[in-house]
Image (spheres, rainbow, N blue to C red):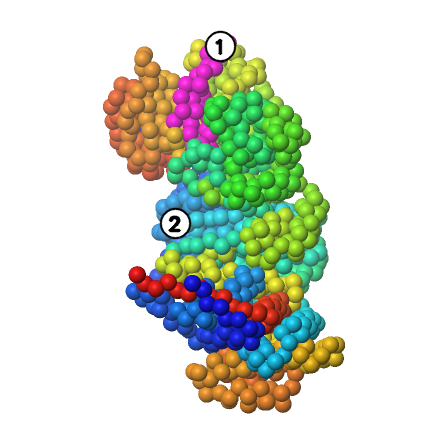
Amino acid sequence: MRELRDGGAAAVASLAAGVETLGAVLARTYGPVAGTVLLDSGRALPEVVEDGGLLARRITGLPDRRGHAGVMALRDTCLATRRRYGDGAATVAVLARSMVAQASRLVVAGAHPVSLRRGIERGVTAASAALTATATAVSSDDDLRRLAAGACHDSEVSEVLAELFGLLGERAGLIVEERSTPGVERGYVDGARWRAKPAFREVVPDGSTDVALRDPEIVVADATLTAVEDVVPALEHALASRRPLLLVVRGIESAAKAAVLGNRARSTIIPMRLASVERQVPDDIADLALLTGATVLGDVLGRPPRTLRPADCGRARLVVLTRRHVTVSGGAGTPAGAEARAGQLLGRAAAIERGSDEWRAARMRIARLSGAQGVIVVGGYTAGERQLRADRVAKAQRVLELAARGGAVPGGGVALLECAEAVRAARSGCAGIDEAWGVDLVATALSAPLRQLVDNYRSRHEAPHPDLALARIADLGQGWGFDAQQGEFAPMAKAGVLDAAGVLTGAVEAAGSLTATLVSSAAVVTARRRAAS
Amino acid sequence: MTNAWRRLADAHVPAAVLAVLSEPATSANASGDVIVGGAGGVAIGAPDGSWTAADPGIGAVAGVVRAGSVLLAGGASGIARSSDGGRTWRRAVVHGVAAPVTSLVAAGGNTLAGTLGSGVLRSADDGRTWAPAGFGLASHDVSALAFVDDHMVLAGTDDGIHASPNAGRAWRQVAGTSGLGVTALAVHGDVAWAAAETGEVLVSSDGGRAWTRRGPLPARAVPSALETNGDVVVVATDAGILRSADGGETWDSAHREPVFTLAIAAGGELIAGTGSGLVSSGDDGRTWSPRGGAPPVHDVSRLVVTGAEVLAYGPMAGVVRCVAGVPMVAAPRPVSVVTAGPHGVVLAAGPGGLARSTDAGRSWVNVLPGDAGFVHVLAPAEDGSWWAASADGARLLRSADGGRTWVNLSSPWGTATVLALAARADTVLAATYDAPGAAVDLWRGRVDGPWSHSGRVPTPRPSVQLSLDPPAAAFDGRWVYGSERGWRPGDGPAGRLRRLIGAGGRLFALTETVLAESADSGRTWNPIAGFDAAQVADVAASGAATVLLTSSGELWTTAG
């Protein structure tokens, strides 16, 4: 059985109730001194959650089905924002809560939903443009550290990430590893690293952790080698050149494997395969070949491995293969070739949904081709601790990526607040009063994050009422805000309170999109929960 | 049984000091010791002038540093650590490709090693494990390292100075130094000094970020080390010590003798390692005088018996005729291997190829021109024929006329590293090492016949010793003995094997704990009394006589 809530006003009010329900909870996690949320998930121990995105992920429904749709809509928007930008879930919740509440009142009061929607979109566009215009380039490791700290609230992780991004630049690709002792460590990949495995167990003998090849010949084949003829040209070339041989293949079986094993006493032969996700393997093989100056062989490419010529082999100064990855240093490929492919990938990545698997894979390829891979090792005694820190790294990493490309703006909700004037200026282009109300509700919502920040601070410390705080900030002038870490009014940029412009832009766009969608809903159909038998 | 040892001679040779560490006197830690490194290992000099030698097992030691409570030594074949002030050493785990270590520095819990070929190695666990940290290095040939503070560190490479702001995790080439072969660095406060192989001297007053050039060193002076106490700068060169008291504008010669390394003791005393020992200066480098006796860091550690003469040799020290009591100036140096065969023939392989002597080392004739590493292992057969191979497996050679002329043969082992050869008139046995596979491969060949792959033995380390008279082999602690029916596994003397020789039907084994002899092809082993195995450098046998060399350079024999 389903329940139909017909009529625009009723539907919007129903959805707004859901957004308010979840938004009020998520809003408590906004800001550096936000409160934690105790989540009773029915397990033995309640879970303490401090991150808005994680909290949104944990809440999967409401017992009251009438508010369910609104809750799920906000949850989905928050999760998408977090996935794309690493941070901003709580900001979306605060903004959407304000926008949806205002929009709901306007629709109930008779505003036309379509015009209202147009106004919201106009306001969001103006806000995004204003944020982008005020962003400044991130110039120092200190800025990077503060941005990371603002996202993950972990000083150790922030310190390390700031150094990594400072040295590796905006093309940085981070490999996150875990260890069982506390602390955070970092390293830099000299060359390029892929997930990889020895082609068979005997390649890395028991008791060894890695195999290192100095100045090897590198044969790259996007194929599984099975026949002796598949490996003979490579073996002959390795023997003639008197260099170790690295075979990068999809697999090596049957007679080909026997031939490799049988010749190990005569030459150093290391067969390996890349352990990327299956659909990424061809791209990774191509990148490895490009960086080492090798030609990719394969039946489907018209160059079966048995046709190998010496000129098809690549070279590198050093190759280190472990049971989990391979690192190629000093590849003989041309820097111009790697740069050209990295440039192509940058263009392609811009068209891929941020945060998706495909986007992450493209980012890591860019890092490999640019020699900008770093390793961050997060430690903790328990798997939970390690996972928590790995999540913080992922979150702050996205924020730093955005800041490296789009710059930073004053944090603590100040940049949003200061966009309001630019948004109101957009009223002039509106076709009617309903559309202008849409612009206004966006402008009004832009003050909500700062209000929420002060309110969250007030829940634990002495502080003025949010209205008074906003008035005080208006008196103090542009750039001033409330530093919730220190509990005082301060010029945000000078105090090092920064936000990545890209995160705020994404949050405003996500909240606006959610509001525009909800406000134009004509009906809500909710499934009625089945009675317990 | 071998007994009745008689002291035959001494094999003392002067040795170059390649590394110096002056330990401050503290109540908890040592007491003002000086630790030096050289071709044969390390030596610890006590305040009373006495020396104690130790071999970390890493070849020529070019760097010594203290990291917390441990001492670290970096050498030609790796890094070792000692927790007891240098008396005993254990090899550290080095990930990646092993490369000669040129310098070691430590600060703030981070330890770095500069290498030739592998860039910078980094350890964060007091030197137990090392991993490459070469991100950003334009050259991976690193000659010098110096910490400015606990985080900022400088590296002198073949392609300029590199700076790392994060304790060596990542590097950036310093602007304006590209192409400069920097061989020495020194830091005092925020002031850093660098010297290049071309004689250029650079100084930085901001911790190594920006550099300016100063007056060059005198022509043809190739610097190897730098030190500064803030007031003066001294440079060690192959022509001696140069000193500047005017900020590097002009340089005066302060000591005329090749110098390889410099250090400053806690009291401000300058110490320099020369070709034969230590010299020191207590007046800011104006005058220098010998400091104590010669430290025992020579690498003479192998014995060869030919007729009545005993030859002792080491790669860097060259060959010493012990009975005659003179070094062989005409013999190859550095020498990679010396072997005595029948009819008084001795062959020695060095950087010029293979040299031959038939007069117990008095004179030598080069019989096979070649480059360094041309021949790495030699094996004579009882009929006067010889076999030789290069380490990289590229060459296999045979001589049928006592080493006068040689024939190139094709080897069956491709590019595998040759560890050992043993020959009879009709048969030769070769052992090669598959490093990635951690296994020794055995090959058997017949004169003018085919080779066969006769076995593969898993061996974590490239350690194998062969004898064909009587047949025996040891693979990193696993023993096998030959008989009419083939090879059989057996037991050997306790301890890690250092040397196995067969002579006249007897086997001699020198391990880390015992010197033992077997007269029944390895079935039973009997300890040879009279010497602590730890103090024995090598053992040789000829006919009924046994000769041994102690680590202090004494030569003992059982011959009458």
Question: From the viewer's perspective, is residue B540 above or below residue A330?
Answer: above
Q: Is residue B300 visible?
A: no
* Residue at 37% across, 28% down: B475
Residue B409, compared with residue B157, is above or below; it is above
Q: Magenta segment, which residues?
A: B429-457
Q: Label 1: chain?
A: B
Q: What x and y, as percent, mark residue A232?
A: 56, 23
Q: Position of residue B436 (x, y in %)?
A: 47, 34
Q: Amino acid at mark 2?
A: Ser
Quadrant assignment, res B493:
top left
Quadrant in which residue B168 is drawn: bottom right
Q: Is residue A34 above or below residue A291?
A: below
- Which residue appears at 39% of the width and 49% of the height? B82
Examine the structure image and report whether residue B512 is included in the region drawn in magenta.
no
Label disc, if present, on residue B449 of the rendered structure: 1
Which residue is denoted by mark 2 in the rendering? B82
Q: Nearer the viewer, residue B501 or A260?
A: A260
| Identity, as a three-letter code, of the amino acid under mark 1 | Gly
Q: Secondary structure at mark 2?
A: strand
Chief secondary structure of the magenta portion:
strand
Identify the element where label 1 is drawn.
Answer: loop
Q: Is residue B450 covered in magenta?
A: yes
Which one is closest to the eye, mark 2 or mark 1?
Answer: 1
Q: Quadrant of residue B215?
A: bottom right
Decide which of B366, B459 is in the foreground and name it.
B459
